[in-house]
Structures are given as C-alpha cells and as structure tokens.
Amino acid sequence: MTWIWNPVWPPWAIGCAVLLLLLVTWLGYRILRLRNIPNRWAGILLMLRLLAVLVFALCLLRPTVRMEHRVRRAPDLLVLVDRSASMAAPAGTNQPARWDSLRRTLTDSPLATRYLSRHNTHLFVFDRTVVRAEIPDLARMKPDGATTRMAAAIQTAWSLYRQQSIPDDLPGMQANRVLLLSDGLDRDPQDPAEVARALGLAVDVLEWPAPGLPSADTPPAITAIQAPVRILQGAEGRVRVTLAIPPASGATVLRLIEGEQEIVRQDLPAGPTLSRGPVELVFTPTLPGTHHYQVRLTSTASPVPFSGEAERPFSVTVPSLKNEVLFLDDAWRWDFKFLRRVMEDDPAFALTAFLSRGTGLYQQFGEPDRQISLGGFPQSRTELGWFDIFILGDTDPRRWPRALAPALRDLVVEEGKSLLVIAGPRLVGWADVPELAGLLPVEMTPETAKPLPGPIAIRLRPESRNSAWFFAPTGQALQRWADLPPVDQIYPVTRKRPAAQILLEASGLSNANGPLIVLAEHTVGRGRVLFLATDTLWKWQMAAVLDAEGNTPYLFFWQQALRALQPIHSRKGNQALHLETDRSSYQVGAEVRLKARLEGDKVADQPVFETGVTLPDGQTLPLNLLADPRQPGVFQAVFEAALSGAYTVRATGYDGGRPLADAQLILNVVEAPPEERAQPPAAMFLANLAQATGGMRIDPQDPATWPPPATAEREILVPRFIEGWALHRLLLLLVVLLGADWLIRLIRGYV
C-alpha cells in the first residue's frame, strides 16, 4: 500500500493551520472543564474535535491510496463481427446463412474452444456503427445493417477497447490482433489495412469454406486487366487478367480477340474458388501501328462473352523497326530536296512527305520500303500516330483539319514523339494555333515571319559542341564545325524559352536578348522539339568544304539530328512494370490504392514514374507514385473512384530520363448494389487485407491456419487506487464529526 499526497496548500501552511486548530481545541477542552462538565463527556467532545482536525488536515493534503493485488489474466483479443444485411446470404452452395455460420464459429468450432478460450476476448458487432456485445447477445441480433464500414469499425472498436483496457505498463497482454468475421463486402471509402497498420494491429480473416453463389445470380466476370501500352514489333506482349468465376459456371475460356480474329485462347477448368488470377495471355504483334484488342470470357461452346463484365478492351501501340518521318510543307523549297536525299540514304528512317500544290491539294512523296502509306493529307490523331518524327516546313496550321494540331501536340507531349520546325514566312499563322506555338523552344513575334537577308555568318554555342547534335570525335570537332558557310536568311525570334538550349546563333546580328538564335531545342513533356530559324541550311551542302571522306557538314548535322530526335523505343535492360490495386473490384466512392513494382535485371535504384488515370468521362488526372517505406521497390498512389465506369491507369518508369518500362491497368467501378442483394464473399479482398497487415486466413477447423500462440495466461499485479477526496468523502466525514459535536452539546445542555 502506497500513500500519494496532493496538498492544496504548501506543507508549512497546512502545518501552521493544524497547530492553530489543535491549540483552539485544547482551549475549548479547558473551558469545558472549568464549567464543571463531567470528564466523560468532555473527553468525548475532545476526541471528536481532534478527529475533525485530523480530517480537515486530510482534506488539505488530499491523499490517494495505491493498492496492488494479483490476478490471473489472458491476453486480449478483439473480435469484430459483421451484421450487415449481406450476412443474411448463404455462406455457400447449400450452406446456412453467413451470420449463423459466424455464430457457430464463435461457439462450437475448434477455433472457439482451443484458440478463443485462451484469450480475453472483446466482442464488437458492426455495420455502419459499432456496439459492444457478448457472444450470447448474437442470438438475439439479426443481420440487417444498412452498410458495412470496415475501416471505421476497426478504428472505433480500438478506441472503445482502449477506454477500459489494462494499463500500458503490462506488455504482452494488450490486444495486437483483430479477428474479423465478415464476408468482405466493404463499403468504407477508407482502406481498413491502412487503419489497422496505423494502430499496430494484425487482422485475421475467415477463410470461407465454399464461397460463391449459383451462376444464375453471379455470372463469370473479368474484374481487372493489366496490359502493356507499347510493344516493339515482333516482341512478346503479356496481358494479366483477374477473373471472378463461380464454381457453378463450369469450364470457361479466356480469349484475346483483335477485330473478329481470335489471337490467343486459354481454357480454364472449373475450380472450387471464386476469384482466380491473374491469368496471363501471351501474344506477339507482327505489324506496326495501334492495335485494338478485346479480352473475352466465354463458355467453351460459344465465343459470345457472358453477360455483365465479361469483356474488356485495351489498345497497344507497336512502333515499326524503322523511324517513320512525316514531312509537311506548303511550299516547295530547296531544303526538302536535300533533306529527302539524306533520309533516303539512311536505312534507319523512312520518309513520307506532303507538299502543297494549291488550296487543299497535296502531292505525296514516300520511300518504296516505308511501312506507312496514307491515302491523303492526315486528318486525325490515328493517322499521325503511325509516325515517330514530324518535320513542319513553311506550313500554315490554320489550314489543317481542326483536330490535327491538338493531336500533334498530344503525340509529342504524352507519347514522346519528336518535332522539327523549319522556319518560313507562314510562321505568322502559328500565333493563332497555341497548341503548336507552345511547343516551340523560342518566343516569336509577328516580325519573325519577315526574314533578315544575308549572307549571315553563324557559329556554334560553346555548350553545343559536345551535344548529340554537333558531336564529333576528339580532334575533328573544331575542324568540322569551325568554318560553317553563311546562310542566306534567318527568321528572327525574340528569345529562347526557359530550359531551352541554343545550339546555333548569328555571329553578327543580335537583339536586346543577345545574338539572334538560329537553332534551339528543348524537351516538352516526353517529346523533343527542334527549331531551325533558317530555310537555307542547304548552303552547308553546296558551299561547304568536304572532309577527307567527301562528306559535308550538312550530312553530318542531319544524320546526328535525326538520331537525337529519334524517340526511345528500347528499354534499359529486361524490365517489366507491374501495376496492381488493393481490390479486384471497386464501388463508387471508394479509394483506389495503386501499387507499381519494377521487375527485371538491373532495376533502377530511384526510378521516376509518369502516371495518369483516365476517368470514365474522358478526363485525365495525374498521379504521383511515391515509394512505400514498408515495402522496398514498391511505389503507391491513391485516387478516389467518384464515377462508375472504366478507369484506365497508364504508367511509365524512367531512370535518369530514359524510359524503363510502361504498363496500363484497366479496372471497372460500379454503383454500390443494395446490401441485401445476393453477392459472393469478397475472398480476394479479405486475403489482401490479411496479407497487408500481417494477419492469417483462418479455417475454424484447421489449427495450422490459426495465428501463432499468444502469450499464455499469467499472474499480474493490478493496481487499485482509492482517492480520499473522491465523492467528497473526507468533507462529508468532517461535517459528520462537527455535527456530532454540536448535537451532543445541544442535547446535554452544554451550549
């Protein structure tokens, strides 16, 4: 027993007050004796007054008595039981209701007699709210809750438990596990795994013995697919498909369709589990371009997909082995003649060109071995998407089809295509097309369309000598680029944009921002843009001094420039990017937790991801994939599924600016069905919840699936505190003593 003091006054003040009261008490006793009051009653009054002084002193000291006693206590365990309306559905084919199955699990199963009996269980029943309960109370309850809020239930149950749990100084006895008895049909927008991890709780879930419902109620469905965004021509592509197939459906077939042609067929035998996957389909596209595929889940007898969510589309871009170049110009200029010859002699590039012959009329030029042949001037993004590099000469984009300029911008910014602009008088029209003007590495004015006549001497900027555009072996760089022929004219721009690089400049002409720019480049999104402010660069071919092999600076520059503009199709090493979500299906209002993992040889230490999700209404939102501190090599992002429909997530991983791998994930979000509608248990969701929190998937009949043994029951010292000031006990005792003194004096006539 330990006394704890909480004095109201300083100790010296309390001592002085007690001494003064004792003195007054002794004087009162002497007065009673002088009045000839019998010794017996005078002594009784003296004792009452001394006790009153003592109690008054205790009132000022406010004591608390701490006492400890030994008890035997088992470790705590939280048990959460779902009583939403979905628990009234059968636990499986020819099975009782899920609610009744859970009640038997808590009373008559080996789990109850050999595992739960070793714990001090705290039972909570939840749907939208959480209430405490005892196991006998479950017989009086009905599964009729309006909805299931699993994350909120874990948080609330933990708070209620902590309000009356044993103190923190008894390690090993507090609950660190939650036994969750639910069908997993969660409607909570929060992730229960995140809540449980934040509280330090492992969640054990029930392994339903025979999940699923008859096929008439739940047809087979595709819950998610993961497909590549781009595949090199002739390389293997892999599509990972997650399925939900009730056992009553029998054998099924997963088909990969392009158009109406079946590309891959995967037979799936009947299985005992509802969720299956991912199933991997391997295919090899042989032709370049954009391929549109369908993944269909059908019966073995018919290629028609099941009703519901049994068909998912996706698209794959297959770049050709050659770099396809598209040249557009409204004028016939010398630059096209010389540039065409360079690309015809280079086997890595295939040229398609359209040159205007009047209003709305274009003449098409193309190499014999090109793989792309357009029927006329391109009209849409689909036709532009076949090409890797775009060269725009003296063209007026205001005369193009309306959708062409935005499509060109998107291909450069989003898909990493490259753009080369050769200046001309029609640059004045670019100011009315902000989609293209915003791509340029320079800022223009109306005066840009008016060329400055030459000859104009040009020179390399010092920082551009070692760039990819003007690189040369040691000892040859100064000689090759030292005496460049002058050009006949340049189209003056105001200045470069931030982060752009000037490669060539005029050596004798300048404005307020410095020497006039002749050549500049920068990166826009994933693509590169090069701007050439002169259309007489062909002088490098005609007037330059040949080197020892007979090559001109013109040939060297364009060969290196085209390779610098070449989009990067290859990947660094054998890399694969895998995207996955925490659930196989989602309902409107839920949080989607996206995880990305790079796999393969030489995985980057600190990759950077460019990620976005396209919503059902067509809007695209950027996502920020951040490293998960708990799982090395895993990156995650969160977004809300606010609309029903298909969501397409695209991600590309980079290492030092070089793309490593890309992938896309297509998932479906549906409106939340009524709670009472028959639905199979969300076995995959429960399994992911247990895995994410370090929990177990429990079979009540199989001890091998139970959590490891908890701390055994043991004797512990439990403190008990008795506060003297609580409920005004001491004050009431003081009033009783003083009242007894007054009552005795009143009755005996000593007043």
Image (tube, rainbow, N blue to C red):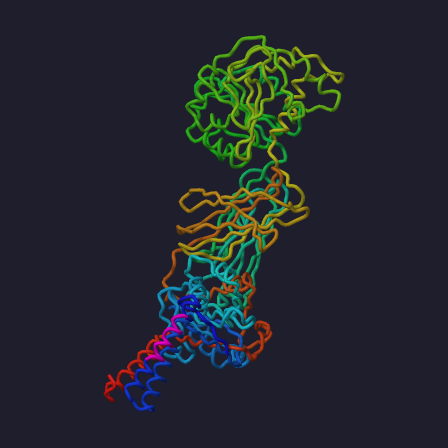
Picture quadrant of residue 386: top right
The percent coordinates of residue 452 (x first, y second) are 52, 10
Q: Position of residue 702 (x, y in %)?
A: 57, 76
Magenta stretch holds residue 238: no
Q: How many marks?
A: 0
Q: Quadrant of residue 232?
A: top right
Query: Can the viewer see residue 75?
Result: yes
Q: Is residue 278 above or below residue 175?
A: above
Task: Magenta stretch: give its range.
Answer: 16-27
Q: Residue at x 39, y 50 (%)?
A: 643
What percent of the width, then of the height, locates residue 658?
A: 62, 38
Q: Main secondary structure of the magenta part?
A: helix
In this view, 74 is above or below 549: below
Camera-nearest residue between 167 and 525: 167
The quadrant of the rendering that contains the C terminus is: bottom left
Q: Position of residue 11 (x, y in %)?
A: 44, 68
User: Which residue is most to the front?
Assistant: 34
Q: Residue at x 60, y 22 (%)?
A: 503
Front-lying residue, 147 or 248: 147
> Does residue 22 show up magenta in the picture?
yes
Q: Is residue 375 above or below residue 280?
A: above
Asked if residue 49 lies left or right of residue 454, the reply is: left
Q: Relative to residue 535, is residue 132 drawn left or right? A: left
Residue 216 seen in render: no
User: Does residue 448 lie above or below 286 as drawn?
Assistant: above
Q: Is residue 526 left or right of residue 725?
A: right
